[in-house]
Amino acid sequence: MNSLILSVGARFLTALFLLFSLFVLLRGHNSPGGGFIGGLIGAAGFVLYSFAAGVDAARRAVRVDPRAIGVWGMALAIIAGLASALASLDPFTGLWLILADLALSTVLVFDIGVYLAVFGAILTLVFALEETL
């Protein structure tokens, strides 16, 4: 599309969508949100950018093949979900690692994996659909 307003606005909105998607991802553990909706919001930013600048420009902006992002996200979610089996607990039981003042959980790692899987899947689908048009 050759709209100057859409081109400039899409660059700004893509960054804003990504920032908001990270907020939703991190907020989702204790409140509504999480990896799934965060991934959708992040992908929506790049979908808007692809409408404004084209699929090739959007692929260059992502810098990594969306299929690879989705695969790594699925792997991360599975690893986080099954990590409790190493501790002889039920699958998907939350485990915590506390380092000084920093507390990390398998729940957050699982949410990040879901975020990446959804982000990669949506971008793969939309880019493929746009390339066929």
Image (tube, helix red, strand yellow):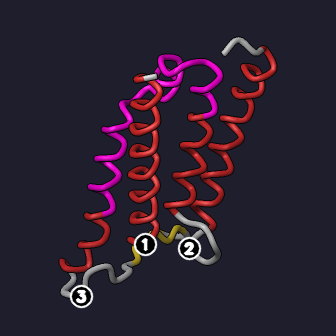
The 10 Å Cα crowd at callout 1, few under 14, some 14 to 19, many 20 or more, is some
Which range of residues does the magenta coloring cover? 48-77
The 10 Å Cα crowd at callout 2, few under 14, some 14 to 19, many 20 or more, is some
Residue shown at 54% from the left, 43% from the top: 43
The residue type indicated by label 3 comes to Leu
| Disc 2 from disc 1: Cα separation | 8 Å
The 10 Å Cα crowd at callout 3, few under 14, some 14 to 19, many 20 or more, is few
Q: Give the numbered dot on residue 29.
A: 2
> Of marks 2 and 1, which one's residue comes earlier in the chain?
2
| Disc 2 from disc 3: Cα separation | 21 Å
> Of marks 1 and 3, which one's residue comes earlier in the chain?
3
In percent of width and height, residue 47 lies at 57, 35
In percent of width and height, residue 79 lies at 26, 64
Q: Mark 1 — residue?
A: 107
The residue type indicated by label 2 comes to His
Residue shown at 46% from the left, 46% from the top: 119
> Of marks 2 and 3, which one's residue comes earlier in the chain?
2
Residue shown at 44% from the left, 74% from the top: 98
